Amino acid sequence: MTDVLAVADHRRGELRDVSYEIITAGRQLADETGGDLHLAVISGTVDEFADKLNREGVDAIHTVSHGEEFNHDVYSQAITQLYDDLAPQFVVTPNSVNGLDYAPAIANELDLPIVTDTVDLETDGETLIATREMYGGKVETTNELEGDAIVTIRGAEWPAAEGTGDAAIEAFDADIDEDAIGSTVSGFEEVGGGDVDISEAELLVSIGRGIEEEENLDLIRDLADALGATLSSSRPIVDNGWLPKNRQVGQSGKVVTPDVYIAIGISGAVQHVAGMKGSDTIVAINTDPNAPIMDIADYAIVDDLFDVVPELIEEFEG
Ligand code: FAD
């Protein structure tokens, strides 16, 4: 009862970054318990996924071949059966839309305590200390769990595992009760702008309330084009209906980890920073030298965006 079972995440045929981050989190826990790290991947394309997931630190990969897309009932049944078979001490899942769908159901089914959205994990082999943030990152809580437990991990909090591993890859013959599958994915319909996944972008130009009017967004689009960057925003821009929800960075938007994040007319509220503090380099353009974004910016331009942005466009288009 010292092993760790982590679960990979994928969407529309692609493994999510958190699948590699969960290996790092799971390996750390397994080192602390002295156990093995097992990784489960449930999909129709398990062989390809298993090869990609075979990174340093994984002891065994268990593949469950069932359907291309995420399905609540399939995941719940397969992971519950894997838990019964492997008897791990901890189950670690992503705090993704999928993970948040099945992890609480499994906790209920297995009668295990669960802590969601964790940003740090530590165990002495008996007690698991799971840290999560509250009030948009203003407060951290530590939750002590005795015995077996389930945790979901926040994306971009652990580095992605690297290096080729030598895990044993085993097909797990889950006994899926097809009659108990209450829903199936019949297709996907993109919401406007759904073609873009800002969480995968390497260069983000992000706009906030400093832009004042929807018409002025064209200026920021021109800058993004000149830089070859992806456009994202703070929440007020989305609340105004100027950009679709999938462009929103932050606590109630997406977590992003680009190489460069250019925050233009964004104050840096805790709820926004929660979604972009993992960026490698942060550039802020803001008239207010005391805006909170300045506390985390690597480079700051304290000036009016309506003066600065045209100059940047000219420079980069030039
Ligand atoms: P403001 O705070 O109004 O900042 C505008 C900035 O633009 C100011 O710093 C100002 O100095 C600067 N500025 C103005 N004019 C210019 C100019 N001409 N040139 C240069 N700079 C200029 N917010 C998010 O972003 N993402 C979230 O996911 C999110 N989730 C939330 C969840 C909850 C439960 C709550 C309560 C709030 C959430 N918020 C979120 C909202 C958050 O609290 C802030 O209100 C929001 O981030 C502010 O957006 P902003 O920085 O664009 O606007």
Image (cartoon, grey):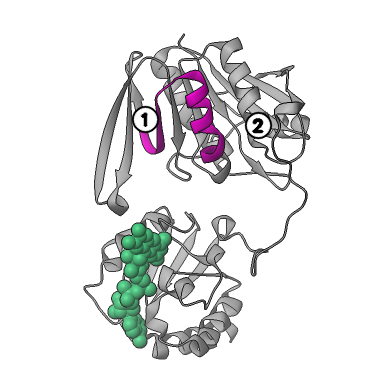
Q: Find the distance from the CA under tag 1 to the CA under tag 2.
A: 28 Å
**Label located before the other in sequence (1 or 2):** 2
Image quadrant in which the C terminus is located? bottom right
Q: Residue at x 61, y 72 (%)?
A: 228
Q: Residue at x 48, y 54 (%)?
A: 257
Give the percent coordinates (x, y) of residue 65. Answer: 76, 27
Binning the other alpha carbons within 10 Å of mark 1 as few (below 14), some (14 to 19) or many (20 upward) gives: some
The stretch drawn in magenta includes residue 109: yes
Q: Nearer the viewer, residue 63 or 148?
A: 148
Assign a secondary structure to mark 2: helix
Residue 147 location, quadrant: top left
Residue 226 in view: yes
- Amino acid on which disc 1 is placed: Leu
Residue 290 location, quadrant: bottom left
Assign a secondary structure to mark 1: strand
- Amino acid on which disc 2 is placed: Asp
Provide the residue span drawn in magenta.
99-120
* Ligand 1, image quadrant it occupies: bottom left
Question: CB atoms at circles 1 and 2 under 8 Å apart?
Answer: no
Of badges 1 and 2, the one in the foreground is 2
Q: Is residue 70 left or right of residue 315?
A: right
Q: Of all residues shown, which one is farthest toward the left?
A: 290
Residue 59 in view: no
Q: Is residue 1 left or right of residue 63?
A: left
Give the percent coordinates (x, y) of residue 168. Answer: 68, 16
Q: Is residue 316 above or below residue 49?
A: below
Q: Is residue 12 left or right of residue 119?
A: right
Q: Nearer the viewer, residue 70 or 4?
A: 70
Give the percent coordinates (x, y) of residue 295. Answer: 26, 63
Residue position for label 2: 73
Residue position for label 1: 121
